[in-house]
Image: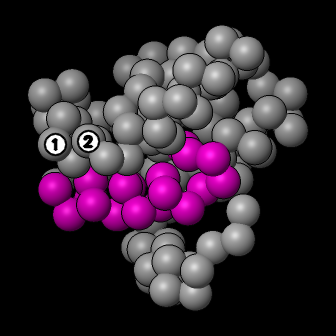
Amino acid sequence: MQHSEGFLKLVEDAKTRVRELSVEETRARLRANPGARLIDVREDDEWREGRAVGAEHLGRGVIERDVEQAHPDHEAELILYCGGGFRSALAADNLQRMGYREVYSMAGGWKAWRDAGAPVEGE
């Protein structure tokens, strides 16, 4: 997908404040911390087409509105992913502004997850 210059600048700025994890680091953190949550921030149609095993869906359009109801503990470990790691960085940045302290964006997103051969469902 071709992204606009303005969007890429916005993402680059967010990534200066957001911690990113590789797929391998994400899987290791999920194994080490049963309370960690993997959150898919993609659109509904993307979610229906396939997702990481164990992920929950809080789409980019509603995550800021719904996250505190789904995860009221601002110390909860939340690892976000999207299609390629851009939207999840923007969402992670906003969640940090909302007071969440253990928020991460998975670098490379869904594409990296699938390329790594990590378990998927719904495909």
Tell me the SS state at disc 1.
helix
What is the x, y in percent for residue 46? 58, 33
Q: Label 1 neighbourhood size at 10 Å, few (<14), some (14-19), many (20+)?
A: few
Q: Is residue 25 magenta?
A: no
State yes or no: discs 2 and 1 in contact (Cβ < 8 Å). yes
Query: Is 3 placed above or below 121 here?
Result: below
Q: Is residue 93 magenta?
A: yes
Give the residue number, with chain letter if any, for mark 2: 62
Q: Label 2 neighbourhood size at 10 Å, few (<14), some (14-19), many (20+)?
A: few
Closer to us: 89 or 16: 89
**Residue sitting at x 54%, y 15%:** 54
What is the x, y in percent for residue 21? 61, 51
Can you tell which quarter of the image residue 76 is in?
A: top left
The residue range painted magenta reads 81-98
What is the x, y in percent for residue 85? 60, 56
Q: Which mark is residue 65?
A: 1
Q: Is residue 51 left or right of residue 12?
A: right
**Residue sitting at x 70%, y 71%:** 2
Closer to us: 36 or 86: 86
Tell me the SS state at disc 2.
loop
Q: Is residue 24 left or right of residue 34?
A: right
Q: Is residue 102 left or right of residue 22?
A: left
